Image (spheres, rainbow, N blue to C red):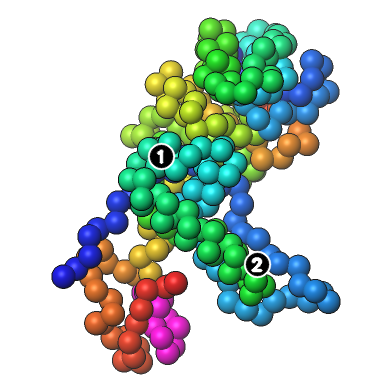
């Protein structure tokens, strides 16, 4: 199963991005093979519609869970219809590597 | 004539904030009564001033009419102003709300997560795998339905459609009113 984590940078030491639609990078982590892929977000500076466009990027990768700090209201219904689970991390100081470690519980 | 029933307002999920405490001039803790900011009022401030929606769009998100949304929003602003001016604590709780999917909180890592299968509850946190999770969807709904005795301060459950102004406190016999 694949999990998307929003990241502020392109290394595992970057912090989790508190925003989903306009995060800098998506980290696509595969739980079965343990691979990570960093996908830059083209909607980083979009003025509107960043959320649905970002959902499309991660949904095309076959992601079933998204870990982020905050989800906008426009994407809630899209994620529900795609049955993608939202995980809200309130501690924004957490690193991507910490999240991956927690996912491998 | 009894008033119309309140529509339940749809909100996105449980807010991360439980409340705000004022920092008083000269230090110390305020002894004033806290202001109860309902969950729908918190959501209205979030939709309008954080997500920058207009009232029409925001009312559709919450599943209420545009005038009702504006009333919720103005009530929210009045409560925030009240807390600022009278140095009162803000407590975010209560309100007639529902979440459109089940939300859970993990007590071990502190994350929130939703679950799509409403019939089956999850056993573990999807992030850290801990089974110390609690459902936030069911316990916070409809706390506005509380009445309080004007004399002894005892709280009672409020039944929908019941006029509590005509009821008496079962303990001391005084009038009771809705919790403000």
Quadrant for residue A12, please give it. top right
Q: Which mark is residue B84?
A: 2
Residue B31 location (% of width, % of height): 66, 80
**Chain for numbered disc 1:** B
- Asked if the stretch drawn in magenta spans residue A44, the answer is no
Q: Quadrant of the C terminus of chain B?
A: bottom left
Quadrant for residue A33, please give it. top right
- Asked if the stretch drawn in magenta spans residue B155, the answer is yes
Q: Quadrant of the N terminus of chain B?
A: bottom left
Which residue is at 65% across, 30% downward? A19
Q: How many marks?
A: 2
Q: Residues within 10 Å of mark 1 (few under 14, many from 20)?
A: some
Which residue is at 42% across, 73% downward? B179
Placement of B167 over or under B61, stated as above or below: below
Which residue is at 35% across, 41% downward? B63
Q: Is residue A100 visible?
A: no
SS state under label 1: helix
Placement of A62 over or under A5, stated as above or below: above
Query: Is B24 left, or right, of A59 in this rendering?
Result: right
Which residue is at 58% across, 76% downward? B33
Q: Which residue is mark 1?
A: B56
Placement of B112 over or under A76, stated as above or below: below
Looking at the rendered structure, whether the residues under marks 1 and 2 are on a common chain is answered as yes
Residue A60 location (% of width, % of height): 53, 7
Give the magenta range: B147-156
Camera-near label (1 vs 2) is 1
Residue A54 location (% of width, % of height): 58, 17
Q: Is residue B78 visible?
A: yes
Query: Is B45 left, or right, of B180 in this rendering?
Result: right
Residue B16 location (% of width, % of height): 60, 47
């Amino acid at each position: 199963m694949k999990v998307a984590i929003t990241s502020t940078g392109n290394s595992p030491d970057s912090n989790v991005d508190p925003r989903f639609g306009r995060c800098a990078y998506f980290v696509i982590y595969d739980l079965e093979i343990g691979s990570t892929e960093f996908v830059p977000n083209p909607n980083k500076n979009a003025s509107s519609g960043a959320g649905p466009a970002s959902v499309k990027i991660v949904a095309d990768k076959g992601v079933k869970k998204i870990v982020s700090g905050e989800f906008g209201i426009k994407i809630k219904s899209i994620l529900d219809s795609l049955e993608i689970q939202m995980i809200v991390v309130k501690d924004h100081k957490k690193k991507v590597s910490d999240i991956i470690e927690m996912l491998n519980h | 004539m009894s008033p119309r029933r309140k529509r339940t307002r749809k909100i996105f999920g449980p807010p991360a904030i439980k409340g705000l405490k004022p920092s008083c001039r000269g230090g110390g803790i305020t002894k004033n009564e806290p202001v109860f900011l309902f969950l729908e009022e918190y959501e209205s401030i979030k939709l309008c001033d954080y997500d920058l929606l207009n009232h029409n769009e925001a009312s559709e998100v919450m599943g209420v009419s545009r005038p009702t949304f504006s009333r919720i929003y103005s009530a929210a602003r009045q409560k925030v102003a009240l807390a600022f001016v009278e140095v009162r604590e803000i407590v975010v709780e209560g309100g007639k709300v529902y979440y459109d999917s089940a939300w859970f909180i993990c007590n071990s890592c502190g994350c929130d997560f939703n679950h799509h299968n409403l019939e089956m509850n999850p056993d573990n946190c999807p992030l850290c795998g801990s089974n110390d999770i609690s459902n936030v969807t069911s316990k916070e709904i409809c706390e506005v339905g509380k009445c309080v005795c004007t004399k002894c301060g005892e709280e009672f459950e409020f039944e929908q459609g019941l006029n509590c102004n005509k009821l008496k406190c079962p303990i001391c016999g005084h009038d009771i009113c809705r919790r403000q």
